Amino acid sequence: MTTELGRRLAARRTAAGMSRDELGERCGADAHYIASLEDDVALPTVGVLVRLAEALGTTVDALVDTPASRGPVRPARPLHTDTQPAVLDEEECRRLLGVRGIGRVAVFTMDGPAVHPVNYLMADGEIVFRTGAGTVLARAASTEAAVEVERIDEVAARGWSVLAVGVLEAVSHPDALERLADAAHAAPWAGGERTHWMKLAPRRLTGRRVEYRP
C-alpha cells in the first residue's frame, strides 16, 4: 500500500532524474529503504524527511503537501480516543528494523540517561552503528542499552515504534570491522571521526503500531 507521501517522493525523485540508489546514497540510506518509503508503508522520521527534501531540492512541506503557511503538520483525519495500538511480534519488529536506517540509542551515564541519534545497520541480527572513540556511546560498552526506531506519518495519523534492549558492545574483530565498513555505504550524518563500531544484540524486542481507521 503506497502512501501519499510515497507517491510524492517517487514523483519528485523521477523528476530529479535520480535512481533509488542515488537518492539513498545522498540520504545515508539504501535503495531498499527508499523503495519501502515509495511503495510500502514505511514511515520516515522528521530527520529523514529533511534529508530527502535536501537531496531532492525541495522542502519538507512540499513532500508532505503541507505549506508552511498552514502551520505545523496535523493529522489529516481526527483520531478517536478509543484507538488502541497494535502489539507487534518479534518477526514484524525485525522486518521493520530493515537493513539500515535511523534510530536512537539510550544509555545510562553518571549524569543520568542519555539518548543519541545514530545511523544503524542490521548485521547478523544485531544492530550496529559507528561512533567516535571516547564518546558517551563508546564509554557505554558492556552496559545495558536500548535502541528505538520509529516511523511517524502525521498526515495519515499512523506510525510504529520498535524498541530493542540488550548489552552494548564494541566491535573489535578485524574481519567483522571490514565487513561492516563494506556494508556502511554512507558516512554517519553527525560527521567527524566516527570509526568506532558498536553493536547491540536484542535480548528483548518489542513494538507497537498505531493507525487511524475510519
Image (cartoon, helix red, strand yellow):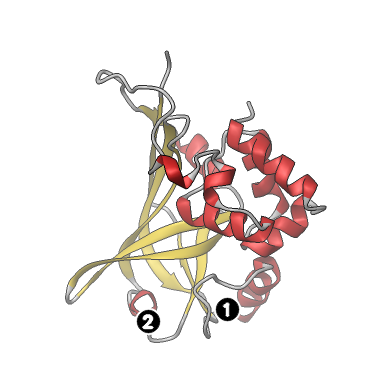
Q: Residue furthest front?
A: 69
Is 193 placed left or right of 214 in the picture?
right
Q: How many marks?
A: 2
Q: Residues within 10 Å of mark 2 (few under 14, many from 20)?
A: few
- Check residue 173 in the rendering and tell me which mark sits there, or answer none: 1
- Check residue 135 in the rendering and tell me which mark sits there, or answer none: 2
Residue positioned 78% across, 52% down in the render: 16
* Amino acid type of the residue tagged 2 in the rendering: Thr
From what the image shows, is residue 10 above or below residue 193? above
Q: Nearer the viewer, residue 188 or 203?
A: 188
Instruction: Find out whether the residues at labels 2 and 1 contact each other: C-beta distance under 8 Å.
Output: no
**Residue 56 position by quadrant:** bottom right
- Check residue 97 in the rendering and tell me which mark sits there, or answer none: none
Quadrant occupied by the N terminus: top right
Query: What is the C-alpha distance between the residues marked 2 and 1?
Result: 20 Å
Is there any visible trace of residue 123 in the rendered image?
no
Residue 198 rendering spot, x and y as whole percentages:
47, 71
Quadrant occupied by the C terminus: top left
